[in-house]
Amino acid sequence: MADELVIELGQAWQAQDWNRAAVVGEQLATGWPQDPRVGVWWYDAALARKFLRDWPEAYRLGRHAAAHASAGGQDPAFWNLGIAATIMREWGTARAAWEGFGITLPPGDGPIDGELRGRLCPADVPGLAGGGVGTPAVPDPRQSGQRPVRYDSPVRGDLGARRGTQGRPGCR
């Protein structure tokens, strides 16, 4: 049965059926928790929810994925959990995820307050990404256009945030 679900998961990814990929990834992870691929399945489920901008589920699934990842080696499970936790304003988890990814943050337990600016800019400041102070603005890595400078530079939107901030331009 697991092999059939692995094939189904691959097909869902190929078709970019993110909802199905999330469901099947979680089914695999919960159905075969001792399988050496379980961390990948949690990661796939969390990433699919991130693509859907389903932040509570991306956060929940991402915590499982990070539990199966190695800290400090820039494992993408920590990066994705950092994004979801930042958007969800779960600052303790966000800090742990960014540090698990390998980014050193100043000590603290509250909002990140721009500590990742230039790397991610999750905490807005007026004029930075068009939102209010403390409103996470997480840039979307997918290119959405071009911005002429001295050369063409990729333009990306942001992945959105809670409290109605979706659709703002991403950080510079």
Image (cartoon, rainbow, N blue to C red):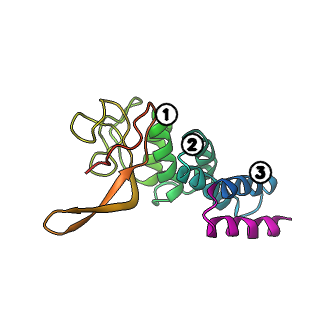
Q: Mark 1 points at which residue?
A: 90
Which label's residue is closer to the chain start, 3 or 2? 3
Which label's residue is closer to the chain start, 1 or 2? 2
- 2 falls in the magenta region: yes
Distance from Cα at disc 1 to Cα at disc 2: 9 Å
Q: Name the residue under label 2.
A: 59
Classify residue 54 by image quadrant: top right
Q: Looking at the picture, how far across and down is residue 9, in whole percent?
A: 71, 64
Q: Name the residue under label 3.
A: 30
Q: Looking at the picture, how far across and down is residue 24, in whole percent?
A: 73, 57
Classify residue 11 by image quadrant: bottom right
Q: What stretch is highlighted in magenta?
A: 1-18
- 128 falls in the magenta region: no
Decide if residue 170 is on the left or right side of residue 53. Answer: left
| Mark 2, other Cα within 10 Å: few <14 / some 14–19 / many ≥20 | many
Distance from Cα at disc 3 to Cα at disc 2: 16 Å
Callout 1 secondary element: loop
